[in-house]
Image (cartoon, grey):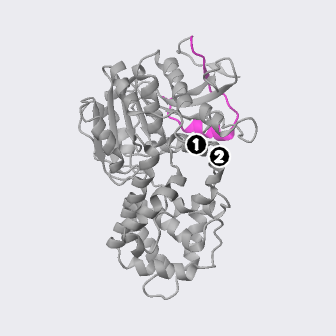
Amino acid sequence: MDVPLRGCSLSYIVYAINRDNKEFKNFASTLPKDFTYGFIKVPEDWNKPNGKHIEIFYYGRIKGSGVYKNLPPTVFFNGGPGNDSHYSYHKLIESEISFDKQPIIFIDQRGTGFSSKYPDITTNYGPSKVFDYYGSEGIVRDAEEIRKALFQNKSWNIFGQSYGAIVVYRYLKLFPESILSSTTDGFALHSQPEDKLLYYKSQMKIKLVSDFFKKFPSNVSRVKKIKTQIEGKISTGLYKNNDFVDLILTRGIQDTSSSDSVNDFLLKVAPDSQFQIDLDFLKKFIFTYFREEINLRTFSLSLPSTFIHYSEIGDCYNLFFEKYLKKIMAEDETLKELPIFPLTDELLLKEDVSKLRGLKFLKNKIFFNDITQALVRNPDLKIYFFIGKEDVYTPPAAYDEMREYFSSESRIKFIARDGDHFNFFKELLNLNAFLKQSDKKKNSLSCKKYYF
């Protein structure tokens, strides 16, 4: 039985947790004692408030303590789509930077984590309905109900990373009056995103791979040696043997802090003192860290989260192949010299994009003017964009158009930070100090997505 949470506005029913699920119990038991956690029931379709309802799980510290005692909370929107908030939460808990007193709220976005799951799109839900119900607008409206319930309609700070940045942009468009400040990291708006984002990504991937082999030139022959000897000896499903080597290395190299580790990995696989590569070591590594890719027989373009991704982010791979690939190959001579192909993932996606036919890319688009209107509707609103210097997914050049458009707006700031797409945790942990214009701490926390 669900029990209303104490201390909340009577206008909004918030359901305290009483779940028998073992995974849920284990997660709840790890939360700090001063955390509030629960479920709120919301319409699946916000245009039909009396229709089917789903549950959204939230957790966090409503009120800070110590130097954070009187500060407003921050709601964090993690990347995705399709990912829960738990990984980011655990990374923050493990941080050396103080997290134990700051007011912060996490939400398992609809369809993820302990919130109600995505619907089965093979039944009554087509791709369009999945986006209409489970995209960023639904997430924002869910967050608004949580804000009203927990904070008696007081405003809060919002922070979004990667896909979470899109949620923040949507929040600015829909409810700017509810926001004290917005901070995004890892996604830029464009006037024509379908024409630009993939090109920026491709150029950044090529640069990082090229820089790696300039730093470690002996790895050119080492990688060729591995590719020659691995052929036909490892079954890798959808990926061919050489493609799989490309996939492993490009993913590692994308995190520039891992370049030394990638080099060490290659030395272990192909020692200078031996003609034969260490095939057993390579197999163990692949089957430990890339098992999902090995078992892949087709790309998962029928998942609800994938349709949301293509509808909101606009990574249209048809455009990549038809418009950009030849141009990139022609203008970048370094591609011919590299022993791996940086765009392996993009190439292999081509065979399955037919499943996306009929899906409208960039549905319900967010425009620059939506951000401008948010500033008009909320005269006290401040907006911050953090830019990872080595972010492959949203390279610094991807922000140029935004910088130019908002150049005269004093309440919008663009701030460069070190690291790649996943090095955003320091900014989140130091957000309160940043908003108070205090000195930032120098501790760094990165999200190690790959395992070199």
* 314 or 32, nearer to the observer: 314
Image x and y of residue 389, in percent? 32, 52
Residue drawn 37% across and 24% down? 373
- Graded by Cα atoms within 10 Å as few (under 14), some (14 to 19) or many (20 or more), the crowding at tag 2 reads some
Q: Nearer the viewer, residue 189 or 160?
A: 189
Left or right: where 5 falls relative to 190: right
> In the orientation shown, which residue stands out farthest toward the right?
123
In the rendered image, the vertical position of residue 91 relative to residue 149, given as above or below: below
Q: Pointer 1: residues within 10 angstroms few (<14), some, or many (20+)?
A: many
Is residue 208 among what the camera can see?
yes
Residue 3, percent across and down? 65, 19
Which residues are drawn in magenta? 11-35
Q: Which residue is mark 2?
A: 303
**What secondary structure is marked by label 1?**
loop
Residue 257 left/right relative to 238: left
Does 397 appear above or below 106?
A: below
Q: Residue 450: horizontal and vertical position, in percent?
A: 49, 59
Q: Which residue is mark 1?
A: 82
Give the answer, above or below, for where 137 lies relative to 188: above
Question: x and y percent of residue 110 in the render?
Answer: 60, 33
User: Which amino acid type is marked by label 1?
Assistant: Gly
- What secondary structure is found at the residue carrying circle 2? loop
Decide whether residue 18 is among the magenta residues. Answer: yes
Q: Quadrant of the N terminus?
A: top right
Residue found at x 56% / y 16%: 6
